[in-house]
């Protein structure tokens, strides 16, 4: 097994099948490895300048606590904080939002969405959540928000907590189920098991949340065709409004990735270490198998009344389902992210908060701000970003993109488009480019082919 330290151009990745250590999922552009501390003043300047006209604003809140760290998790999460520490964090988070709301770029702007992500937002107690929400709403009113999204881990939910979420205005409840098989959940370090998934469902139904999303992962350790078929069936029976399916990867800094790298440095091969230790190296499904599982889920869910709304998301056809957060972020709207390690995009400037517990708290408590690194995008970079993120929906209108960014997208991307056409992963329909289903199933591996030359082959994070 080789250690993949860089994203390579799409064309050279097509034959790569082993699941190696390295980031595959593309969430932003330019790659994070180009963001720097030296550009932080530009982020402050963007916050202290008037906003761009006609741009929506959303609020992301990072709640970084989890009951347990999943072995595939690469997010900034903490599993060892007591209630006093959590309260200190929530105080800093509320303060950060209050201060941010007074910045010229954000002041008096209505929010189009509020997203509670993590971590596990549902980890915090109702008595901690309600005062936080009250302060957030006072600082940045939610009255015009089209979506209040809240991520949950099934085992942290009670009936009273769900009732509180409904009453505070949550419109999209997102349940991190990932798999319905207890052995797989246990092996991958999930905190919940299947009984907890079913325990919460009657409460969710009774409270009638406008939208229930369920997350699944294709290719968790221990998955087989048999267990995956059962998970897909059970997911359909669970009857969510939307289903989000990710293909498992091994970004740096996960428990599994560290085990792989350690095994390599010690000359071990996969599967030889039979111990139960967290650094044991298990078998990882290859990309071909994960795509097959993903394709099977799409086909089966289609037969059950779902349709694709992006490479990862299926939505129930007869229901009113949208995802404002995703559409806003992918189309380059503004988003202020608050909390440790959170990401923002304001007036064309990307920035990220400090990713250490102490650094974040010290920044907010001493200076009201904790930005750690930033990147000032130019118009070409914003064009590329919008194209690659929207390609995840399966199609992009190049003429609309050209009009918006003042540059001929068709000409700019003629080479990667021609290459993907040659491989029958993409076709053209007038001004629109469309990924085929095999293309969509590997979209994250194709996107680096659209990067500007200076970002080709660079490390992503
Ligand atoms: S629940 Fe989510 S955020 Fe928490 S450790 Fe697991 S994958 Fe990471």
Image (spheres, rainbow, N blue to C red):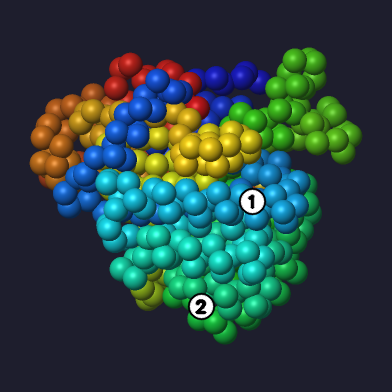
Q: Position of residue 48 (x, y in %)?
A: 29, 39
Name the mark nearer the viewer: 1 or 2. 1
Q: Position of residue 186 (x, y in %)?
A: 78, 52
Q: Secondary structure at mark 1?
A: helix
Q: In this rendering, is residue 127 above or below 104?
A: below
Which residue is located at x 35 percent, y 27 percent?
41
Q: Give the quarter of the image for residue 239.
A: bottom right
Residue 270 or residue 278, whichever sits in front: 278
Q: Position of residue 363 (x, y in %)?
A: 53, 36
Q: Which residue is mark 1?
A: 88
Residue 167's tag is: 2
State which quarter of the image contains the N terminus: top right
* Residue that protrudes farthest toward the bottom in the picture: 206
Q: Residues within 10 Å of mark 1 (few under 14, many from 20)?
A: few
Q: Would you say the residues marked 1 and 2 are in contact, meaning their CB atoms lie under 8 Å apart?
A: no
Q: In this rendering, is residue 281 above or below 97?
A: above
Q: Is residue 237 left or right of residue 415?
A: right
Q: Give the quarter of the image for residue 250.
A: top right
Q: Inspect this view and state whether residue 26 appears.
A: no
Precedes in sequence: disc 1 or disc 2: 1
Residue 105 or residue 212, whichever sits in front: 105
Q: Position of residue 237 (x, y in %)?
A: 59, 73
């Amino acid at each position: 097994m080789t250690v993949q330290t860089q994203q390579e151009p799409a064309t050279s990745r097509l034959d790569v099948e082993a699941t190696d250590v390295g980031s595959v999922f593309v969430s932003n552009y330019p790659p994070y490895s180009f963001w720097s501390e030296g550009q932080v003043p530009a982020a402050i300047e963007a916050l202290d300048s008037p906003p761009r006209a006609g741009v929506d604003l959303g609020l992301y809140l990072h709640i970084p606590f989890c009951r347990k760290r999943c072995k595939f998790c690469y997010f900034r999460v903490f599993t060892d904080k007591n209630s006093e520490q959590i309260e200190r964090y929530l105080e800093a988070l509320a303060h950060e939002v209050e201060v941010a709301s007074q910045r010229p770029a954000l002041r008096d702007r209505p929010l189009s969405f509020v997203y509670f992500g993590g971590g596990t937002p549902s980890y915090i107690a109702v008595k901690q959540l309600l005062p936080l929400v009250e302060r957030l709403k006072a600082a940045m009113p939610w009255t015009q928000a089209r979506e209040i999204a809240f991520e949950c881990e099934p085992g942290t939910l009670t009936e009273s907590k769900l009732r509180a979420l409904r009453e505070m205005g949550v419109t999209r409840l997102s349940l991190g189920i990932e798999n319905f098989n207890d052995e797989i959940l246990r092996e991958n370090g999930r905190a919940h098991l299947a009984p907890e998934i079913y325990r919460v469902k009657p409460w969710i139904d009774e409270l009638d949340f406008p939208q229930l999303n369920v997350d699944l992962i294709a290719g968790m350790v221990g998955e087989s065709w048999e267990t995956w078929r059962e998970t897909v069936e059970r997911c359909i029976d669970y009857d969510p409004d939307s289903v989000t399916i990710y293909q498992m990867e091994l970004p740096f800094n996960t428990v599994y990735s560290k085990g792989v790298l350690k095994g390599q440095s010690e000359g071990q091969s996969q599967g030889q270490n039979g111990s139960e230790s967290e650094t044991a190296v298990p078998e990882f499904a290859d990309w071909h198998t994960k795509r097959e599982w993903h394709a099977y889920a799409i086909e089966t869910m289609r037969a059950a009344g779902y349709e694709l709304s992006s490479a990862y998301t299926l939505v129930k056809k007869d229901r009113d389902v949208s995802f404002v957060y995703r559409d806003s972020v992918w189309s380059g709207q503004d988003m202020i992210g608050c909390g440790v390690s959170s990401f923002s995009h304001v007036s064309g400037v990307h920035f990220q908060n400090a990713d250490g517990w102490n650094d974040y708290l010290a920044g907010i408590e001493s200076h009201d701000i904790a930005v750690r690194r930033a990147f000032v995008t130019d118009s070409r970079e914003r064009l590329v970003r919008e194209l690659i993120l929207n390609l995840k929906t399966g199609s992009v209108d190049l003429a609309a993109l050209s009009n918006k960014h003042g540059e001929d997208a068709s000409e700019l991307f003629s080479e990667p488009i021609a290459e993907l056409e040659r491989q029958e992963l993409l076709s053209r329909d007038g001004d629109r480019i469309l990924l085929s289903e095999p293309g969509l199933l590997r979209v994250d591996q194709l996107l680096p082919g659209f990067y500007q030359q200076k970002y080709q082959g660079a490390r992503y994070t």
